Every structure is written in structure tokens, then in C-alpha cells.
Image (cartoon, rainbow, N blue to C red):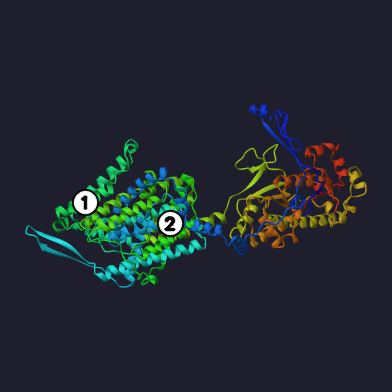
Amino acid sequence: MPAPAKFKRTPSQIKVTRGGRVLLDSSSRWSHDVDNAESESFVEDMVVIERPIYTQNDFDQGFDAGQRPKHTALSWMKGKVKKCECSAACVRKTVSHHLPFLSIMKEYNIKKDFLPDIIAGLTVGIMHIPQGMAYGLLSTLQPVYGLYVSFFPVILYFFLGTSKHISLGTFAVISLMVGSAVDKGLKDNNIVLKTWNQTVDNGGGNITFEIVDNSDEVETAKLMLAMSVTFIAGVIQILLGILRLGFLTVYLSDPLISGFTTGAACHVFTSQIKHIFGIHTDRHSGVFKLIYTYIDIFTNLPHTKPVTLIASIVCMFILVIIKEYINANPKIKPKLFMPIPVELIVVVLGTIISYFAQLQEKYSVQNVGDIPIGLPVPNLNAFNYISDVIADSIAVAIVSFAISVSMSKIFAKKHNYAIDSNQELLAYGSCNIVSSFFSAFVSAASLSRSLIQEDVGGRTQVTGLVSSTLLLIVLLVVGPYFKTLPNCVLAAIILVALKGMFKQFADLIALWKISLFDFATWLVTFCATVFLDVDLGLLVGVVFALLTVIMKSQRPYSCLLGQVPGTDIYRDISVYKVAKEIPNIKIFRFDSAIFFANSEFFKNSLYKLTVDPYQLKKMQRKLDKRKKNEKQLLNLTIDSIGSADIPIPDSDRTDTLTSPPIIQNSEAKSPQFVSQVPTLTDIHYIIIDCSTMSYVDSMGVKVLQQVISEFRAFNITVYLAQCKSSVREMFVKTNFYKTESKNYLFVTIHDAVVSAQLHQWAVTGESLANTGISNTAGSSHEIDLGITIGEATSRAENVNDFNKSNGVRGIPQQDITSNPVIENTHI
């Protein structure tokens, strides 16, 4: 392999010109004409840089390059130990970091923040009441437990949370996942809900009641299962926060979350249909449970209770009209002091109407039932079913954190403040652990409540304190008055709230236009969530998303680069039509790191776009065979002519035969009398642009060595350009430089190209396409690179002068195709 020439170092000069005037010179300041020049926008700006060609080794030595700082677990721990100081300031900083409310209250502006926080807190608190009861019902528990979720976590988040705008509490998807875990726990422990129908005579006709055996044993088991899920989810979130694994949410992409929540919304919708129609369906769990549920629904539709259905439709109509045409109307919205609390209005009206109309007694409309007064006492029985719900708890912990922190980041970005993902994990975990002892299930941020909180002017976490105060009043005083609230009213609230989630189907259209991988991730996650189950759907979505990452990294984009004429800029020739390839040189770029998963693809892509050594080997074998046949033919011809006894007239004799015969000076072993073998390839240099390679593993290094070796066998030189420090460090660790020279690594592509061109001209005196001059073995050339290639060439009067000045001698080649003996020889 020819070694690149060594060049003299010359000082680098940078000039910026406009309209022929020098605006910037590296040896001086900006020209005083710069302001006037800048006003001439029609004049093209020019940058002229004169510097030596730098191999990576020369550049590192010339500019005192050092080692990258190494970030290991040990160095991280040492850094933490050094920063640790037993001082009052250190203690205050640590406490303030883990209790963000201290900083919030210290900077709290009562005049500006207090009134908006009060209004937002009351508004969100009013929303908490119906949503808490509805989502409590969704979790298969009594509605009052949803109110507990709206109270305890919200208070704790005030002290520990870093987001100023999210509203923690009940959330439809999380409530559904908790309910699914509860159902599985009941099934695993052989705890079954007993239901039957009973018909009684009411004077004017028969009325059928659905009687559900909600014995204390069953209700206690359901509550313990929900508390166990909450406790384990909190522990997992605490551990993730301590280990600083908040970054794991990056693996839950937006298409994945969108597809998952939309699929979960289908489960939520299905679970409420029975309340809308007033029918009974068995609860199913596991794979295809949605299909089994709809079979039950259609089977029991003839038993629909008309009053329940009418009440549901009226409630949904009122909710949609007020929410969509009044609260969301841009003309009416500014005139409202606060959004109309339509959910609370529907709940109050439904409770009053049900009480006075005796809907349950007369029309079998199922009500919420008794709601206990006061706060629950701490319950330490949350550990009874831990072993039964670990798998479900992991999924609930991850989904609740991902949803909540995603909302936190949206509001933080909008209002220009920072949140700490790891502190958020600690906050969510603490809220769930503490709440689990007070009969609450897993909490999460609600998008609808968070948007309302921000929209009505909430500015800090004080909003949560205000809403919790309102919930406390409800729990201590108002709760029992909701005894006659129909379940169908809560179901109507849930279904209308799902509208935002079902709107996410529109994401499919945008994703189809943007990325096929994202489109597939959304669709696969949605289908898996709908047809398998909520927890399995999340798992399938995460696995598929990771597979798309692997697929992208296994088969990244690769291309050939060409030079933009008159510049040192190299671009993809398939994108920039003006970019031209340089004769005898191929510049290859691979848009990824090289590691075990894509190293073979890298090699195949390189061979496909440049030249395949395996094909060259086949061609070489064919040419060798052809050469051998020609030698045999030549020997046969010589023997035939030498043994022939054919008189030749004097007139037919030529100078060719009367002169010293060529054949006498020819032997079969002489290559001069074999037909010229065509060149296998006109590619003599391959430059690999390594700028997009963030790292290379050991297999990647082996593949690089392999391709360099295979190209070297055919006199093709491989240069590496723009290698990152991490790649060069791997070269050192894997002894790459024992087989390859450091002089083949260049700082930029242009350095590699110019070096290849100069070496090519120094060796041949002209383009390698017309080889006729070879370099003296072992010669070393000193070329002043302070001039351009054109200037270096023009300084030589001709090619021979250029070669002589660089110590290059030529070996003339003899063309024998016109040899009459060969031309006239036939078999």
C-alpha cells in the first residue's frame, strides 16, 4: 500500500473577502470597510483558507491533543464524594432539591400568584369530585376510593413535585390498569363475584333487579389488591428515582404512548357500556378479553333498562353541548370567569333527580351507594397480595410515570421552567406508597384537569393545596349526599372525557406522512393493547419500538459523496446533482456507528457503492486463465513457425523478418508478448467519511481491517476521514495501528482527497487512468502545501519536469497489439 506523502507544515491563513475586499485576515482585525461591505447584500461572500494537509496524527501532535475525560461509575462516585460537604449550605441545597416547595414558597408572590392559584384550585377541585368517583368505579372499587386518590397524592405532590401545572389524581388509563390487575388477582385467588337476577311484583308489573354479592370479603380483597398494586408501583418508582433512571422514558416514544392510550381508551369505553345500558356483563381478563366482553354486551342488549339509557344519553348530551360549544368556544370563553363545571352540575342534578324520582327503587337504576364520612384510617394490609400483582405493578408504575412526566415537560417547556425527571419519580413513588396505606390506588396526571388548571391561571403547586382542601370538605361533609348518584351519570362523564383520546386516531395520518416506523409503532401498540390486554399491549409496543431502533441501526443510510465544484464541501451525489465524483476516488459515508449488528451491512454497502473485492477476485482468476491460455497459444505459434518448412519468396519477405527477429528475442515467459491485461478497476482510492460514526466496537474495527486488507490486495488505498475521538480510542484499544498506518487517518475529507490526488500525481505524473510512470520505491516527497494543486502543477513546465523535481522515474510500456506475428496468428 503506498504511503501518503509527508508535507511541510506551513502557517494557516484565513481570509474573508467580499467583492474583492478583504474583510478578515487571520493576522489582523476586521477591516474598517466591513460595515459598508455588509450593506452590499448582492456581493458574494468568500472564505479563503490556506493551510497544510493534516493527517489525524499530525494534527493531534501539532495541536497537543489530549485524552477525552472518562466518565465511569467510579469517577462519578468520586465526584459526588468530593462535592459532599458537611456544611449548612450543602444541607440546605440537598433539602431544597428534594423538597421543591421550599424554593417555591420562598419565591412565591402573593399579590400575583395567590388569587389565580385559588381560582384554579377551586376549578380543578370541582372537577376532581365527579372524575374521582367515576374513575374509582372504573377501577372496580367503590367511587369513594377515587376521591381518596384525588386527595392524598395531591397534597404530597405539593411538597415533592417540580411541575407547577399538572393535576395529579385519578386518570382513566391508570384506573383501568388497576382494575385489570384487581380482576386478575381475584381470579388467581379464586374470589368470584356472585350475581343473579330477582323479579318482584310492584303492583303494576314485574321489575327485575340485578343483585350483586358484594360481600365484605370480596370488597376487602379488591381493596387489598388495589393497595398492593399501588404500594409496589410506588416502590418501583422510588427505586428508579434513586438510581436516576428517569431517562428510561425516552424509550416510550410519542407514537407508542399515543397508540397505547388510544387502545386503553377502547377498554375504558367498553367497560362503561354496561352502565350506559344498565345491563350486566361478566368481567373478563387476559388475551382477547375485549372480544369476550362485546359478546356478552350484545347477548345482554335485550335486557337494556330504558330509564338508565335515557339518563345516560341526556347526561352525555349536556356534557358535550357545554364542553364543546360553550367552554371551548373562542367567542364565549373569554367572557367566562371560569369554565362551567358541567361535570359537577350533572352529578348534582343526577343525584337530586335520582333521590326524588326514586330511580333505583322504581326503575332499577343502579346508584353509587353509601359513601363513608371522614378520612380512612391507615391500613397496613397492603402487603397481603404483593406476590400476585408484581408484574401488573411494574406496568402501572412505568405508564403512570411516563404519562405524568410527559405532561410535566410540555408545561415546563411552555412556561420556561425546568423539571427534574428523577425528582418526579421520587415524588410519584412517595405519593403512591403513602396513599396505599390510606385506601387509595395509583395516581397520575390528568391531561384534562391539567389543561384546565393552566387555562384558568394556575401558577404554582399551591393550586393542589386548594383543590385538596375542597376534596377534604367533600369527604368530611358532602360525601353521604351522593348516595343516590346513578352509575350511568359517572359512566357518561367517562365516555365524554375519552373524546380527546379517540382524537389520537388522527395521529395515524400524520405519522404515515412522516415516518413508516412511527406509523407501525402506533398501529402495533394499539392493536396489541386492544386485542391482547393493556399490560401486554404496552410490552409489545416497547419491544416493537426497540426493534425499529435496531432495524434503523442495522440498515442505516449510506451514500457516495461528491465535491461541490470550487469548494472543499462534499455532499451526497444522489441529493446534490452539482456534486461531482473525483476520478479514481470514491468517498463513502455510512450514517451510523459500526457495531456487531450492522458491521456486515457496512461492508456490503461499501462494496456495493464502490467496488467489490470478491468480484475483482473472480475477474482476476478469469484474467489469469486468459493470460495462461495466451501464453500457451504463443508457445504453440512459435513452435509452429519454427518447424514449418515453407519457402518464402524474396518479394514477400519483409523487414520484420530480415531484421533481428522478434521471435528470437521472445520467450513464453516474457510478459511483453502477451496481450495487455485490462485494468480491473479504475478506483485507486476509497475515502470513508467517519464523521457520522459516534463509536465503533471491536467487531466494527475488525470489519474495517478486513475491508482495508481486501482493497489493499488490489492496490486500492483506503483513507479514513473525520474520525471522532471515541473511534480513535477504540483503534488504540484494539491494536488497529499495528496493521494500519496512522497516516491514513485525516482530519477532513478534503485533506484525504488532496493527499490522494497529490500522491496519485506524484506517482504517475498524470491521472491514474493513463498509468505509465511509477514511483521510485521508498522515495519520500516534500511538497509545499501552502499553494493549491493547480499552482503546484503549473509550476512544472511539463509532466516530466514535475516528476523529475519529485524524484519520479518512468518505465516505458511497450504496446504489442500491432505486432504482426500476433495479429496474423490464427488457429
- Quarter of the image holding residue 473? bottom left
Which residue is at the far left? Answer: 203
Quick one: 661 or 729, which is closer to the camera?
729
Q: Secondary structure at mark 1?
A: helix
Where is residue 536? Give x, y as percent.
Answer: 41, 62
From mark 2 to mark 1, how far is it between C-alphas? 36 Å
Which residue is at the far front? Answer: 88
Quick one: 288 or 425, which is closer to the camera?
425
Q: Secondary structure at mark 2?
A: helix
For this view, does 71 lie left or right of residue 454?
right
Which disc is residue 350 wearing? Answer: 1
Where is residue 669? Give x, y as percent.
Answer: 84, 57
Which disc is residue 159 wearing? Answer: 2
| Residue kind at label 1, given as amino acid type | Gly
From this viewpoint, is residue 505 visible? yes
Where is residue 421? Give x, y as percent.
Answer: 49, 56
| Residue kind at label 2, given as amino acid type | Phe
Q: Residues within 10 Å of mark 1 (few under 14, many from 20)?
A: many
Quick one: 637 or 165, which is closer to the camera?
165
Quick one: 555 or 355, which is closer to the camera?
355
